[in-house]
Amino acid sequence: MTDATGPVRGDVPRVLADAAALAAGVGREGERGAVWRLTEHERHLDANVIALPPGERIERHEGPAEDVLWHVLAGSGTLETDGEPVELRAGAIVWLPRGSRRQVTAGAGGLRYLSVHRRKGGLQVGRPAER
């Protein structure tokens, strides 16, 4: 966001991570789950890099109430959906419609992907009438 004097609240484009370095860690022993997260305070997106060791999976679940975009950074795997299985490979960009059911299994070399979606609201205390 800008005003007549320039950027406000520190909202300036900048590099946040090195995707090549994040991809290079594919199959690294012991790394599982989010290995990088978008942490900027004033944001409308959530993003993270997910690492799955060889052969491991994220069990079947219903996705969030918003669309999700994945960019496979390294490795391979399979995305099981209510439709045909989707083969995942480095470079693939995958759209997961809101609420879609999915299970992900990493290939023999592991899997790393960037996941991006709209930021969910934080937890709020109290009943809705009190907010």
Image (cartoon, helix red, strand yellow):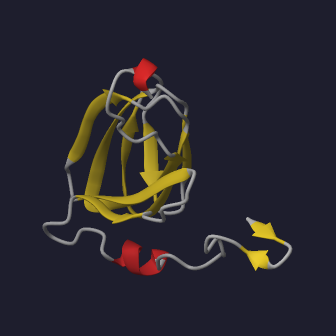
Measuring from the top left, give residue 106's x and y in whole percent. 28, 51
- Count of number-bearing discs: 0
- Say which residue appears at 42% left-offset and 64% top-offset: 39
- Say which residue appears at 48% left-offset and 52% top-offset: 46
- Say which residue appears at 52% left-offset and 46% top-offset: 117
Vertical position of residue 1 compared to residue 4: above or below: above
Quarter assignment of residue 67: top right
Between residue 92 and residue 47, name the one nearer to us: 47
Measuring from the top left, give residue 107's x and y in whole percent. 29, 54
Vertical position of residue 78 compared to residue 42: above or below: above
- Say which residue appears at 55% left-offset and 57% top-offset: 43
Which residue appears farthest toward the right when viewing the image? 4
Q: Is residue 41 left or right of residue 5?
A: left
Vertical position of residue 131 compared to residue 51: above or below: above
Residue 114, visible in the rendered structure: no
Measuring from the top left, give residue 113's x and y in whole percent. 42, 58
Residue 47, visible in the rendered structure: yes
Quarter of the picture holding the N terminus: bottom right
Vertical position of residue 82 compared to residue 107: above or below: above
Measuring from the top left, give residue 121's x and y in whole percent. 45, 39
Q: Is residue 67 left or right of residue 113?
A: right
Between residue 54 and residue 20, name the one nearer to us: 20
Q: Is residue 114 left or right of residue 11?
A: left
Which residue appears farthest toward the front when viewing the image? 130
Quarter of the picture holding the C terminus: top left
